[in-house]
Amino acid sequence: MKNPENRFKAALKAGRHQIGIWNSIGGNTVPEMLAGCGFDWVLVDTEHSPVDVNDVLPALQAIAAYPETSALVRPAFNDPVLIKRILDHGAQTLLLPYIQSVEEAEAAVRAVRYPPAGIRGVAGLTRASRYGSVQRYTETASDEICLLLQVETAHAMKSLEAIAAVDGVDGIFIGPADLAASMGHPGNPGHPEVVAAIEAAIGKLKAMGKPAGILTLDENFARRCMELGTLFTAVSVDLAVLVKGVRDLRARF
C-alpha cells in the first residue's frame, strides 16, 4: 500500500483555509467526538495538557475514523525523541512549540526526516508504516509529513521570516498568549501592541507565501486573522467549550 496522503498538508499547498479545534482532554472519546463535528483539523495537545505520548496513539486512531478531519499533534517540546515517538504513532502533521531561532527550526526539520537528510530513528513495525505494509515508507515518509513551527515570543518574532524560510518548514503558527507575556502583557493577548504584532506577522508570512496559523478563543479576532490571511485557524479548545457550557448551564438555574 501507499503512504496515506496528508490532506492537511495538501490543503496548505493549495492555499485552502482550514478551521480547527484543540484537543486537551485525554482518552479517545473526546478526540473522536471533535473529529465528528465537522472541523477540518483537530490538534492533540501534549504540551499544555495531561495528554502524554502514549495517549496520542488512541487519539489518532479515533480521529482516523473521520477521513475529512486531519489530526495534528503538538509535542511538549522540540525534542527529537518525543518527535520520533509521535511520528511512529502515525502523526503526519506536527506543531512544535517555542521555536526561537533558525537553528532550532533546522533541528526540527532534521528530527522529522530519516537519514541522510535527518536524524529520525528507523523502525519497521509502527503505525506510521501501517506495521510494515506501506511500501518504501522510509524513503517516502517526509513527502507526507507537515512541519509547523510556533513563533511565540518577541525574540522569535525578530527572526520570523528567517525561521519561516528554513527548508522543510511548512507553516508558522503564532502563539498569542506566550507572545503577549514576552511583550510584557501577560494574560492580555488582546493588548493593542500584541494584536499589532500578530497582524504584522500574518502579513509578512502571507507576503512570502508561507502558511500562517493561530489559536484564539476571540471569535472576532479569529475572523480578523482569517481576513488577513491565516490558512489554519483554531477557534477553540475542548476544555474551554466544556467550561463555558457548564458555567452557562449553572447560571441559568
Image: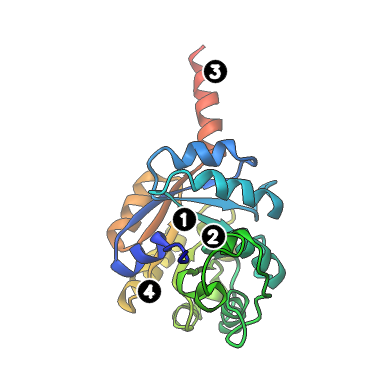
In the rendered view, how is the structure colored? Answer: rainbow
Q: How dense is the environment of label 2, judged by Cα within 10 Å: few (below 14), some, or many (20 and up)?
A: many
Q: Which residue is mark 1?
A: 191
Nearer-N-terminus badge (3/2): 2
Q: In this figure, which residue is indicated by the disc labeled 2? A: 180
Secondary element type, mark 1: loop
Measure how far apart labels 3 and 2 are at the Cα level: 32 Å
| In the rendered image, the vertical position of residue 119 relative to residue 66, given as above or below | below
User: In front here: 15 or 252?
Assistant: 15
Between residues 219 and 173, which one lies in front from this camera angle?
A: 173
Q: In front of the other: label 2 or label 1?
A: 2
Residue type, label 3: Arg
Whichever of callouts 4 and 2 sits on the residue coming sooner in the sequence is: 2
Amino acid on which disc 4 is placed: Lys
Q: Residues within 10 Å of mark 3 (few under 14, many from 20)?
A: few
Return the x and y of residue 70 as percentages of the image width and height: 44, 53
The residue singled out by tag 3 in the image is 250
Q: Mark 1: which amino acid? A: His
Q: Earlier in the sequence, mark 4 or mark 3?
A: 4
Q: Secondary structure at mark 3?
A: helix
- Residue occupying image coordinates x 56% and y 57%: 73
Q: Amino acid at mark 2?
A: Ala
